[in-house]
């Protein structure tokens, strides 16, 4: 049975942790801790391994953070530079020797784009397809992780250990609406806070779970539709159908889960589906990109996963096996496929299982 999951690793030239994924001018890009790569659609065969190869963009070898596709080109933020690859594939450094993070277009034209950096906010402005960059260090002078639009056109930003910031961007100036650390309902002793744009408003993700903000009471409250056992959620991405793709876990526990919350518009609730993703349970997911044709990509700290929802997925908790041999030491056990419980005696901690499965993920 063809699997819904495809894996890309260093064999496919995926190098480093995948921090951002985007399709730009129908070319598929990934930003990693070792640079910028794109998917070469030329199929290769190497040592009986079939797949597609990623190619590095040689001019960008930085520890890359985020990607943004615009009508004027591909923006790339990194720990050292801010790049623009224009639509003629010419690469320009918009700023050097500075750490840049997340992008937020201010409208659908992409002529003005906010970008977070290690000392606050920046504004990228395109005039006749030519970009300019203005950096702000007031009223916020902190390293900002993520940035998101709210339904009232205000803007939220998350940080490491400095809480969450709420602003309004008017003209070319920043109006600070609020700065919250562990007050107004936010949990105590949280570290990072990330913010995500969604059709329900900005989701404020903490190590203690996801929160929403009540603009009337200026109070944060736990998101009852997404919170399960106070799990943290990172990352999270809403697709064009208002479904939320996510990875989650609990503070201090290694176990992680990946899933999708399907939006039910009639009742304004989510149906959370995790079972098809048990095959990638406990994988560390760093980025998510809902692509075209029912495909979603998951970036990991050591590779990339492609999930095709059009293909049949299997419940791995009910996998049936046919054992051809079970060998304990020098003994071969027989008649192990008649649904009877067997006890295997062994002393040398050396057991070999040979089996056949109807599919492999």
Image: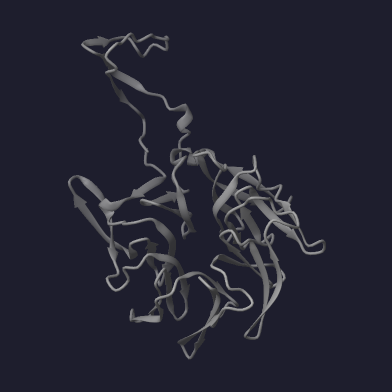
Residue 297: image quadrant is: bottom left
> Hey, which residue is sitting farthest bottom in the picture?
128
Who's the residue at 70% across and 50% down the image?
223
Who's the residue at 39% across and 72% down the image?
80
In this rendering, the answer to whether 336 lies above or below 76 is above
* Image quarter of the N terminus: top left
Residue 212: image quadrant is: bottom right
In this rendering, the answer to whether 65 lies above or below 171 is above
The answer to whether residue 209 of the structure is visible from this angle is yes
Near-viewer residue (185 or 123): 185
Who's the residue at 78% across and 64% down the image?
215
Near-viewer residue (23 or 183): 183
Image coords of residue 273 (percent x, y) = 57, 42
* Image quarter of the C terminus: top left
In this rendering, the answer to whether 193 lies above or below 118 is above
User: Is 170 on the left-hand or right-hand side of 34?
Assistant: right
Image coords of residue 325 (percent x, y) = 27, 17
Image coords of residue 274 (percent x, y) = 55, 41
In this rendering, the answer to whether 88 lies above or below 349 is below
> Hey, which residue is sitting farthest left in the picture?
47
Image coords of residue 314 (percent x, y) = 45, 36
């Amino acid at each position: 049975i063809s699997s819904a999951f495809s894996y890309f690793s260093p064999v496919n030239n995926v190098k480093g942790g995948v921090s951002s994924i985007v399709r730009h001018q129908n070319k598929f890009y990934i930003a990693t801790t070792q640079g910028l790569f794109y998917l070469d659609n030329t199929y290769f065969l190497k040592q009986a391994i079939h797949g597609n190869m990623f190619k590095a963009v040689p001019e960008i070898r930085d520890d890359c953070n985020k990607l943004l596709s615009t009508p004027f080109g591909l923006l790339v933020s990194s720990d050292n530079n801010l790049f623009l690859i224009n639509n003629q594939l010419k690469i320009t450094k918009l700023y050097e020797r500075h750490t840049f993070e997340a992008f937020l277009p201010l409208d659908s034209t992409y002529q003005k784009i906010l970008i977070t950096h290690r000392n606050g906010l920046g504004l990228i402005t395109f005039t006749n397809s030519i970009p300019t960059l203005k950096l702000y260090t007031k009223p916020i002078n902190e390293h900002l992780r993520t940035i998101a639009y709210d339904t009232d056109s205000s803007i939220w930003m998350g940080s490491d250990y400095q809480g969450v910031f709420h602003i309004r961007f008017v003209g070319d100036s920043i109006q600070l609406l609020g700065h919250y650390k562990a007050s107004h309902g936010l949990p105590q002793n949280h570290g990072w806070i990330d913010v995500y744009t969604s059709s329900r408003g900005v989701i404020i993700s903490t190590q203690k779970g996801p929160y929403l903000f009540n603009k009337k009471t200026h109070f944060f409250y736990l998101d009852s539709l997404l919170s399960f056992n106070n799990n943290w959620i990172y990352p999270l991405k809403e697709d064009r159908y208002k479904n939320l793709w996510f990875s989650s876990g609990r503070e201090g526990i290694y176990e992680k889960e990946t899933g999708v919350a399907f939006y039910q518009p009639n009742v304004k609730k989510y149906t959370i589906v995790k079972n098809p993703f048990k095959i990638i349970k406990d994988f560390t997911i760093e980025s998510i990109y809902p692509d075209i044709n029912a495909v979603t990509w998951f970036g990991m700290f050591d590779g990339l996963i492609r999930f095709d929802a059009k293909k049949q997925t299997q419940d791995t908790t009910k996998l049936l096996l046919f054992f051809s041999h079970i060998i304990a030491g020098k003994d071969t056990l027989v008649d192990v496929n008649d649904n009877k419980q067997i006890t295997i005696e062994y002393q040398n901690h050396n057991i070999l299982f040979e089996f056949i499965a109807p599919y492999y993920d």
